[in-house]
Amino acid sequence: MAAERLVVIGGDAAGMSAASQARRLKGTDALEIVAFERGHFTSYSACGIPYWVSGDVGTRDDLIARTPEEHRERDIDLRMRTEVTELDVAGRRVKALDRESGRTYWTGFDKLVIATGARPVRPALPGMDAAGVHGVQTLDDGQALLDSLDALGGRERRRAVVVGAGYIGVEMAEAMLKRGFEVTVLNRGEQPMATLDPDMGRLVHDAMDGLGITTVNGAAVTEILTGPDGRVSEVATDAGTYPADVVVLGIGVEPETELAREAGLPVGPHRGLLTDLSMRVVGHDNIWAGGDCVEVLDLVAGRTRHIALGTHANKHGQVIGSNVGGGYGTFPGVVGTAVSKVCDLEIARTGLREKDARAVGLRYVTATIESTQRAGYYPGAKPMTVKMIAEHRTGRLLGVQIVGREGAAKRVDVAAVALTAGMTVEQMTALDLGYAPPFSPVWDPVLVAARKTVAAVRGAGS
């Protein structure tokens, strides 16, 4: 029998993880693998781009886990700078455009993996396409930003405006600060880090101010203004105008699913592809999808969400590759764990915010505590704030947010495990966590928050 053909659209985390896992399970005599990537790079850490831009990561190649040549050595026919422009589901074929030669051609498939990722949100406002305005999602984007910074030369005063104050926004604000720019962050929301509740976001705002980053909340961008050379010169908002030599868009990303939607594949409320537990596209036995182009089940809220994270993408790829290769795997869902930092301030969250709990009809209580990441008497002890949300009456943990210094962010992993296990805050107080003065107070801050939340649950009555 002729080998089956697997076609993979997208050469980063989900796509190439799926291809590599399928190849481990099936040799070339049983499975031919053809992968298309429209960019210049494969299998890289998009999450590391801000740290490459800042100079913390030395070179672009440090972010690349596996090159196209390494994939080809594993008998994967990887076609770079080639974009899939049309998907014929009924005919089981894809149309590809070779960006270098301009040639287009069709390739048939027996099985298909869609891993087209996400694209930065770029509002349709005047001047958004001007030189010096950059979204940051791929290595190509990161290189374009660095080239743009180099083009500024040795100006004595350099000003960067970051539009948006989510994870990408605060990370890119730090990167620009480290490169010697005066940094202004324009944020439409009440506080930076909308993935946190506003009271926790205020802590981030205060810390950014202390670092010399100007954060303007409640500011909606209306236009990008340019100079005589066509390069960005100012950013206009409904709250004022801000000078800029470079603009970085940190508004967030959206699923890159236009190709799939045009082919009639199902998408959810966040425009991400819908899959079952095996990552198979709903209603299509021979098509799988993973990474930033899909929606995933939120195990706490019971609804689908769009979360663009490399951790999920790699897991999706492993599950898809196992199933395509004749094995078995499932991806049950997420609890929404994420960490970030701006300079030495660490930011973490998992589970639901207050407004998320309200949106799904849950009554809840909250508790917020101040602690330190080490015993208070141990050198280097620094403050940490932990906010915990639990379901009214039952005490089931719903969410945790942490803002603090060194050693704060990864404490959220304890809460992520508790959420996945469906634990109550009272059960959490008995967790046997590690203790020594250099690492934690006798009562870990997460457990202190759990104790206070237990009291809130009991005090809430019926």
Image (cartoon, rainbow, N blue to C red):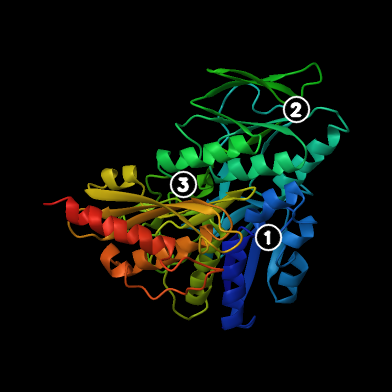
**How many badges with numbers are in the image?**
3
- Residue drawn at (78%, 29%) of the image: 158
Query: SS at mark 1?
Result: loop
Q: Quadrant of the N terminus?
A: bottom right
Q: Left or right: where does residue 424 sit relative to residue 330?
A: left
The image quadrant of residue 396 is bottom left
Few, some or many C-alpha atoms within 10 Å of disc 2 (few <14, some 14-19, many ≥20)? Answer: many
- Residue drawn at (68%, 36%) of the image: 134
* Numbered mark located on residue 261 in the image: 3
Q: Left or right: where does residue 82 sit relative to residue 314?
A: right
Residue pointed to by mark 2? 245
Looking at the image, which is closer to me, 372 or 285? 372
Of circles 3 and 1, which is in front? 1
Type of amino acid under label 2: Asp
Of circles 3 and 2, which is in front? 2
Type of amino acid under label 3: Arg
* Numbered mark located on residue 288 in the image: none
Looking at the image, which is closer to me, 263 or 417? 417
Q: CA distance from mark 3 to mark 2?
A: 37 Å
Q: CA distance from mark 3 to mark 1?
A: 26 Å
Q: Please say whether residue 113 is visible from this viewpoint.
A: no
Q: CA distance from mark 1 to mark 2?
A: 28 Å
- Residue drawn at (36%, 73%) of the image: 431
Looking at the image, which is closer to me, 12 or 91? 12
Q: What x and y, as percent, mark residue 204? A: 52, 41
Residue pointed to by mark 1? 44
Looking at the image, which is closer to me, 260 or 277? 277
Q: Please say whether residue 298 is visible from this viewpoint.
A: yes
Type of amino acid under label 1: Tyr
Of circles 1 and 2, which is in front? 2
